[in-house]
Image (cartoon, helix red, strand yellow):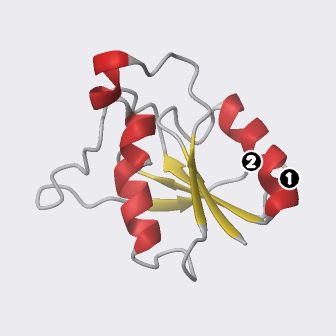
Amino acid sequence: MRILLTNDDGIDSVGLHVLARAMRPFGEVVIVAPDREFSGAGAALGALHLIQPEVHKAHVEGIDEAWAITGPPALCVMFSRLGAFGPPFDLVVAGINPGANVGRSVYHSGTVGAA
């Protein structure tokens, strides 16, 4: 099973790294996450006609494939779904989120927007 893992806290988030290693027994984990913090981005993709998102190989201990994108988490998932990182994924996991995504705040959550 191919598992896409993303978050809104960025590629260097400790929670992302811990979750990635915890998911390894369940399949091939590929991380595609923002290159920096994008909390509050919701399901935003960015103004693609104004920017040129960049993709960089990243290193996450214990994970074979990790990528950082200069854009919000929903853009990371969109690129992944369009095949930028290989064959289709069987599962998309967004998190770990250090804050609560409850009530109306879910509309602004980059974690929920990525899912």
Residue under the image location 53 percent in, 37 percent down: 10
Checking the image for residue 100, the label placed there is none
Residue highlighted by disc 2: 20
Q: Amino acid at mark 2?
A: Ala
Cα–Cα gap, marks 1 and 2: 8 Å
- Circle 1 residue: 62
Q: Residues within 10 Å of mark 1 (few under 14, many from 20)?
A: few
Taking the spot 56% from the left edge, 27% from the top edge, the residue there is 97
**Left or right of 33 in this view: 72:** left
| Nearer to the camera, 5 or 53 | 5
Instruction: Tell me the SS state at disc 2.
Output: helix
Q: Is residue 52 above or below residue 95?
A: below
Secondary structure category for the residue under label 1: loop
72 and 24: which one is in front?
24
Q: Position of residue 65 (x, y in %)?
A: 70, 64
Identified at 43% across, 71% down, the residue is 81
Q: Residues within 10 Å of mark 2 (few under 14, many from 20)?
A: many
Q: Residue furthest left?
A: 49
Farthest residue to the bottom: give it.
Answer: 87
Q: Position of residue 1 (x, y in %)?
A: 73, 72
Q: Name the front one of labels 1 and 2.
A: 2
Please identify the quarter of the rendering in which residue 38 is found: top left
Is the Cβ of the residue at disc 1 closer than 8 Å to that at disc 2?
Answer: yes
x and y, in percent, of residue 5 in the image: 61, 53
Q: Amino acid at mark 1?
A: Gly
In-image side of 85 versus 105 (left or right): right
Is residue 49 or residue 105 the one in the foreground? 105
The residue positioned 27% from the left and 30% from the top of the image is 107
Q: Is residue 39 left or right of residue 26?
A: left
First in sequence: mark 1 or mark 2? 2
